[in-house]
Amino acid sequence: MTATKQKLSTKYPITWCPGCPNNLILESVKTTLSKLIDSGKYKHQDFAMVTGIGCHAKIFDYLNLSGIYGLHGRVLPTCLGLKIGNPDLSVIGFAGDGDAYAEGIAHFIHAGRYNADFTYVVHDNQSFSLTTGQATPTSQQGYKNKSQIFGVVDMPLNSIKLALATGVNFIARAFAYDTKHTAEMLERAIKHRGFSFVEIIQPCLIFNLDMNNLNKLFYKIPVNKDKAKAEKLAEEWNYNTKEGKIPIGVIYEAPSSTLKEKYFRKSASLKK
Amino acid sequence: MRLNILIGGKAGQGINKISAIISNALSKQGYFTFNYRDYQSLIRGGHNFNVLSISDQWIASHESKIDGLVALDELTLKLHKLELKPAGFIITQKGFEDLGRNLNVALSGALIKILGLDKKILLQEVKTQLGDEAAKAIEKGYNSQKTKFSLKKLNNNITIMSGGQAVSQGAINSNIDRHIAYPMTPATGVLHELSRMQLKNDNLVVFQPESEIAAANIALGVSFAGKRVMVGTSGGGFDLMSETLSLQGMSEIPLVVYLASRPGPGTGVPTYTSQADLDIALRAGHGEFPRIVVAPGDPIEAIENTNECFYLSEKFGALSIILSDKHLAESEFSLNKQANKPLRVDVKRKLPGKTIVKTSSYEHDIFGCTAEDTKIINQGVQRRLKKYEDIKKEVQKFQMTKLYGKKNSKNLIFAWGSTKGAILDAIKDLDCKFLQVLYLKPLSSEIKKEIQKAKNVILIENNVTGQLGRLIREKTGIKIPNRILKYDARPFRSDELKIQIKKMLK
Ligand SMILES: Cc1ncc(C[n+]2csc(CCOP(=O)(O)OP(=O)(O)O)c2C)c(N)n1
C-alpha cells in the first residue's frame, strides 16, 4: 500500500461480509483519491464524504476522510449542504440503491438541475442488503425476498435514463469487480465540473444472488459526449434481464455551469 | 388614549398599504401602533382585514371594539359594522369609485384627516414612491373628511417591525451565512426578508431547496462545513425535518431552526395563528438529546432570542429552536427601545478543509467511527446529557423569564410567546403579575418559586390543551387549574382578555 493510501485508511475493523465487492469499491476509491492527492492538485483535508445508511455506507468508517455519516436517503442534500457551506471542498457522496432510488429519489431528480460540483456514487446491489435483502427500485422482476414472497412484480427503474432525463451532465457506470476501470470512472467524475453520478454495479453475495453473474454482459465504452447516443446506451440494459449487453464507462459527459458559479457569482468572500 | 381602526376589503385591494401609510405617519407623530393582520389563504378576493391599534403608550395588541371602520368593499361594512363603538366613524369607497388602484391611498388620505395628522410628509412620500396620481388621490381623500381627533405630536422615537423581520435581524446580528427554507406560512416572511438582505450582506446566501427534508439536511451540511445557518419552517415542514433534528442530536452539528406555528393538525388554518406546536418543538426527533427552545413575545425579544440561539447552537453543537407563530411573525409592532448588543457567534470548531473531522448519525467514538460497544455508547449518552447540563448553566445569563405587573400581587399569570402583547395590555390596571416564559427548554427554576408564592395562578395560551401548563406540571409537579385558552385560530384581543382575567382574579 502506498503511503497516501495508508493515510486514507482507518484502523476500524471491516464488517462487510467476506468477499463483499464493497471491499473492492473501497480499494478503487483509495486508488483514485491517492492518485489525485499525489498529483498535488488535491489536498487530503479538502475531501469530505457523506454516506447514507446501508452496507455501502460502512465505507465511512474505513476511509480517513472528513464527513458526515448521514441519514438513509439523504446523501444528496447533505453533500449539497457541504458545497453550499464551503464550495471549495471536494465532496463525494456514497449511497446504496435503496438510499438513492427509494428513500432519497426526490433529491436525485433535482441534483442535475442544481449541478453542485460533487460526486455521487451509488453502490447498486439491487437489494436492501443491510435490512436483509428486500427489493429496491432496481431489483429485477421475480426477485423473491422476505417482504415480497411472491417475488417483485414491478419493472425496475432505469437510473441512468432518469439521470439523463433530469439533466445530469456526468453519468458513468462501473462494475465493482473491475477496480481499475472503477477507479478511472471515479477520477473522471471527481474531475468533472458540476454534479457527477457514478453507478457501480455491485453483486451482493448474500441476497439477490440471481443478479450475481452478469460479468459476461459488461463491455467498456469510450467516453461519450453525445446525448442521443447516451440515451441509446442507457436503454441497453433495463436492470431486469441477464441478457444483452451492459455498457460501462462514461455514458454521458457535457460541460455546464455549476452551483458555485450560479449562486456565488456575487460574492468574492466565499472564494477564500 | 387608545384607538382601533379596522381596515377591510378583498385581497389585492391594498389594505396593507393603508395600514402601512397610517402607521408610518403615526410613528412620525410619536404614536405607538400595533397592526394585526387577518387574512385568508387566497391571493385575490375573499375578505381580509387589518386592525390598526393606536396609542400614546407602548401597546402590542388590538381590541375587539373599533373606533373607525375603513371599508374597501360592501362585505367589510356588513361584517364589521357591529364592532363599531357608538361614536365610531366609517369611511367607504363611496365617492372614490373612479380612482381604481388608488382607492387605498385615497382612503389613507381620508384617515389622515380624521386623525388630525399632518398630510405634508405623507404627500411627499407618496409622490416619490407611488407617483402623482396617487398623490392626487391622497389629496382627494383628505379633503373628503373632517378632523375628528387631534393627535398632537409626541416625543417618542419609534420604528415599526414584525416578528419575522425581527428574527431576520437577529440572524443578521449573528452573522448568519446561509438561510435554507421551503416556503410555508407563516415562516415565509423570514425567507423573503433574508433573501432581500442578500443585497446588503455579501456573505449571506439564501437557498430554497426541493423540500423541508432537503432543507434540514442541507443545513447540517452547511453547518458542518463551518457556516452559520438557520432553517425556517412551520408545523408540517417541521414534522418533515424531525428525523434530521435527531441526526443533529447525534452528530452534534450546530443547527438553528425557526419554527413559526399556525393552527393544525394537518394543513389546519394556514394563515391564522396558534400556539399548538410547543410539544413538537420540545420533543420532535427520536432518541434523547439536548435542545434549546425559546419563544420570544415581541420583536425586540425575537432579535435577542434569535441571536442567543445562534450563540448557544454554535457554542454547544446543539439544536436551537426559535418558536414563534403567525401572530408574532406577521403582526407589526412599534419598537420603543433597542435590542441588547448581540453576542458574537464565532465558529471555532474543527472544520473539513482544515483538518480531518468526522461525525455520524450512528453512535460513534471520538474519531466519528461507528460504535456498538457499551462503553462508548455510555460515553456518548453521558456526553449528550452533560451538554444539556452545560446549556442549563449557560442560559442562566439570559432572561429565561420576565416578570411584569404588580410584583407582590397574589394573582399570577403564566404565558409564553405571542400572547405577551395582549396580556400586558390587558393587565395594565389589574391586580396581578405576569410571568412570561421565554425559555421553554431549559425551563427556569423561577417558575416553581413564583407559583409557590402565588395564591391564584392563571394560565393563558392560544391552544386547546394548555401545553405550557403541561410542561410546568411535568417539571414542577404543580397543576395550574385556572386556564384561559383560545383556539379559534385568532389571537387574544386585549379588551376581551381583560374581562376574562378579571373574572379569575382573587
Ligand atoms: C428512514 C429510514 N428508513 C429505514 C431505515 C432502515 N434501513 C437501513 S439500511 C436500509 C437499506 C439499505 O439499502 P441500500 O441503500 O440499498 O444499501 P445496501 O445495504 O444494499 O448497501 C434500510 C431500509 C433507515 N435506516 N432509515
Image (cartoon, rainbow, N blue to C red):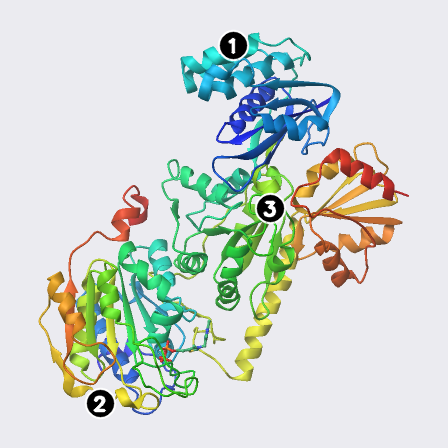
Q: Give amino acid for label 1.
A: Lys
* Above or below for B59 versus B368: above
Q: CA distance from mark 1 to mark 2?
A: 86 Å
Q: Residues within 10 Å of mark 2 (few under 14, many from 20)?
A: few
Residue A29, image quadrant: bottom left
Query: Measured from the top left, where is residue B440 in percent x and y?
Result: 67, 54
> Which residue: 43% across, 76% down?
B369
C-beta proximity under 8 Å, tags 3 and 1? no
Q: Quick check: do tags 3 and 2 share a chain? A: no
Instruction: State the mark number for residue B477.
Output: none
Q: Earlier in the sequence, mark 3 or mark 1?
A: 1
Note whether A212 is above or below A102 in the view shown: below
* Camera sees residue B115: yes
Residue hosting label 3: B325
User: Can residue A8 be seen in the rendering of this structure?
Assistant: no
Residue A132 spot, x, y in % from top left: 41, 86
Who is closer to the viewer here, A180 or A167?
A: A167
Secondary structure beneath label 2: loop
Labelled pair 1, 2 in contact (Cβ < 8 Å): no
The image position of residue A36, as x and y in percent, is: 20, 68
Residue sitting at the far right? B506
Location of the N terminus of chain A by quadrant is bottom left
At horizontal 71% and vertical 53% (from top left) the residue drawn is B464
**Distance between the Cα atoms at labels 3 and 1?**
39 Å
Local crowd at mark 3 within 10 Å, few (<14), some, or many (≥20)? many
Image check: B346 left or right of B410?
Answer: left
Residue position marked by numbered label 1 in the rendering: B140
Q: Residues within 10 Å of mark 1 (few under 14, many from 20)?
A: some
Distance between the alpha carbons at the discs numbered 3 and 2: 58 Å
Q: Residue A98 is drawn in which quadrant?
A: bottom left
Which residue is denoted by mark 2 in the rendering?
Answer: A213
